[in-house]
Amino acid sequence: MVSKYAIFVIRRLIGSLIAVFAIATFNFFLFRVLPGNPIELLFRSPTLTPQQIRALEEQFGLNKPMLQQFVIYLYNFFTGNYGISFYYRVPVINVLIPRLVNSLILLLPASLAAIAFGIFTGMYAAWKRGTKVDVSILTAAMGLYSLPSFWVGGLLILCSLFYLKLPVSGMFTYGSVYPDVWTYLEDFLKHFILPFITLTLITYGEFTIIIRNCMVDVLTEDYIKLAIAQGTPTLRLLSRNALKNAMLPTISIIAINLGLIVAGAVLTETVFAWPGVGRLIYEAIIHRDYPILQGAFIIITISVVAANFIADMLYGYLDPRVRH
Amino acid sequence: MFLIIGLMVLSTISSYLLKVEGQGNQVVFRVGWGGTSFDTFNPFTTIAQISLWSTSDVYDYLVRFDKTYTNFIPDLAVSWEEVNTTYIVFHLVKNATFTDGVKVTAEDVKYSFNLALQDWSRLAPNLKGLESCDVIDNYTVGFKVKSIPMFMIMGATAVPIVPKHIWEKVENPATYADNPPIGSGPLMVTEYKEGQYIVLERNPNFFRKSWLPHVDKIVISFYSDTSSAANALKAGDVDAVGPYIPRAMIEGFQSDPRFKVVVPPAVFYYYLSFNVYPEGLGNPTLRDVRVRQALAHAVNVTYLAEMSWDGFAKPIATPVATSNPFHNPYLKPYTFNLTLANELLDKAGYKMGSDGVRRAPDGTPLRYTMLVPSNLPELVRVAQQIATWWKQVGVDAKVEAMDTGSMTAKIWVKVDNTTTLGHDIDLWDWFMTPSDPTFLSIFLSNQVPTETSDSGYVNETYDKLYEDLFNAPDMETARKIAWEMQEMVYRDLPYINLFEVSTPQAYNVRFTGFSTDWPGGPFGGYDWTVFLEARLAEATTTTSAITTAVSYTTSPTSTQTTTPPAVTSVTSTALSTTATPSGMGASTITMVVAIVVLVVIIAGISWYLLRRR
């Protein structure tokens, strides 16, 4: 006898696969609706000959009918072959994976830090709801949430130029020879700290607001009043009785955010010249580099769908009502 | 598949760790590039200026240009002789080797020119006049060409000599990545990461020791835009930036004693193009040259140059840059005279309508749409200014700013499978070739289908002259033909040429040795000598303040040193500190501790929350 939970998992899994496939189809046509011919945009050169254009179109399969290109695309999608980048002229995977790793190195710690701070301050604000503390935390969160990342990044760069003297671009001092691992780590951390702060600041607000609101809902429930009446210590009450229930809606928000970090952070990465996947996508759009765009969007799709799937699973695990 | 991806993730992470090796106090010259990023090493298919520039010293050429683009410097060819007006013989150096140890011979030269002639090669149009290439002996190679001066300018200086023994084994040279490139030049590529950076080091076996670079390493890092590259220069992450610094940041660099700003001869310009294509779909009144002449008189190019790039832009009357040896200096921009423009239109029979817009005798109103790329805000302002002047002569022009993709789709439209021009007017920029007259090909009659010509100028005499250019027996004739062609487009006005812009670049005064008057500038992507000439200026105590992170030697290496790298890499003085300066070390430890604490807290919370009661 298959358990109800297993049926739930299988149903969600099938739903996720359908979503991935639908988005993959959409991906193909999305970029081809963009106006402008990739060859012309890439090679705006007064000396381009018709022979060269034909050779390039053949090389990238652009001379085939759209439907045939789509079939090839689907076949490649299922065999894990993302094609050759128009711009870099190497397999997409070779370009995409290192950039993805770079983005994760930056975004994962920043998101986790933002979530951690968000839980703390959100919880505190909810406990002190209606007071000046609550209002000031909410205002700060709202303010940070609405700040554009390039502006925050620009401010930090300005600070760095005058006071901090930290490097403002790249992941490392490229081309350096490091005498030991510590110097190497130091170099990395110096490059890491400014984009890390920027990203943490701008994502922190969102989590704080969500967690505070969920907590306020929970804290007004009768069982909390009962717990207070029973004399449960505040910290224990918050973390054990309240936070657990408040986490339910928060989990899906966190999951989607974590799923989206594989998309990189275009603005922050550009401002700090962080060689992440966001910058790659941005440049690929300028170059109309379809294979890179398709590869990147498929990875984003899979990651978001997978994150949602995991969130669903957790939900079902934590809240038995969902399974039915 | 996931296994492969997983392995790649691991290898990416480990590749960072593997770089920790050895002790070194090296002089590193860092360039930040804010233009289009590096595409491929394959010198026959690359389209990015940065790819050509950063590998300009990795491959050898037969000869090299000097900065006037009229004299030639021996490279692989130590001497050359013109047997007659159509045959030229090059004598190669005998001790040149590729970085894999194989000797460079005449066979490699012939093979490289043969590759360059292929359909898919970007160099094929350069070799229009090349008839045959003969290997005379191992170190002598002869070329039968239509015009020796054109071959020197466009072939001998442009075709990189690649190793035949490697390339002939390649299945398809058109898609070959050529990474790492095996060349015979003074530099070699030691590290490259797509879209991130490239590291060049001296080739110790290079045959001409005097060309070897004065620094141990050259690092070129790629930025998505010029502002972040300029910020990196300010912060000391890089020592120079190209292809230019943004207009708004120039004053900041000029007033800072740590930097020097270079304002080089221009290689880049803005123009306004009319759709004059006979089969074009735009407003037909623009095909009347009298209308275009009147409109040209209603544009004040001097004012526009001042308005958008004050001090850095110069009005230009031809599409050939002032610094180009083929530039016609006798052509001057049309005078700005609104009264004259009005008179010309009256005379041509374009009567003013009641709504202030003139009409052609057949009733077509002089109402146009001007397309401008929105990523060039200064050009959008220029277009708006032109529209206000034209309003005063009874011409209604609507400015439409859009991304370049949409613009190309509006300019070149397909009707029944043939490409035609669909717009009225567009404003755009071109990077002009600094050395040769090939740029004049944008007005050739057959350039609409290749989506190169946005004017659709069709003129058989002009096409014929362009052919003659490649048959010119000497430089004087070639120049005269180029001048005549420029006069023709000046008269017929498919373009109103607006102004050329010098692209200001900046570098840290810690380094010196750059030629500031190279067309396009030392960091503009054209100057092949910059990596060989870059050297440290006198080391001072203030310079160490702006070096970041890992310290490098700031010792004054003697400027003319040609000692092999093994010797120079150990030159260090008391100035060059090793590892971490004490103050920075403490802050790093704090940072490490903070991050570890953070990770522990996060892990703890998640464990606590997810634990079931």
Image (cartoon, coloured by chain):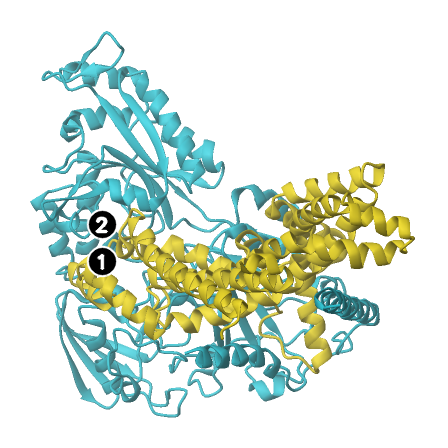
Chain colours: A yellow, B cyan
The residue positioned farthest toward the front in the image shown: A1
Q: Amino acid at mark 2?
A: Thr
The residue positioned farthest toward the right in the image shown: A231
Tell me, for residue B585, which label it has, or none. Answer: none
Disc 1 target residue: A48
For the residue pair B522 and A267, the one nearer the viewer reads as A267
Disc 2 target residue: B452
Query: Helix, strand, or loop for circle 2?
Result: loop
- Residue B35 location (% of width, % of height): 45, 56
- Does residue A16 lie above or below B87 as drawn? above
- Does residue A283 lie above or below B292 as drawn? below
Q: Dot 2, crowdedness within 10 Å: few (<14), some or many (≥20)? A: many
* Chain letter for the residue marked with disc 1 in the picture: A
Residue A233 placement, left or right of A126: right
Q: Dot 1, crowdedness within 10 Å: few (<14), some or many (≥20)? A: many
Q: Amino acid at mark 1?
A: Leu
Distance of label 1 from label 2 (alpha carbons) = 8 Å
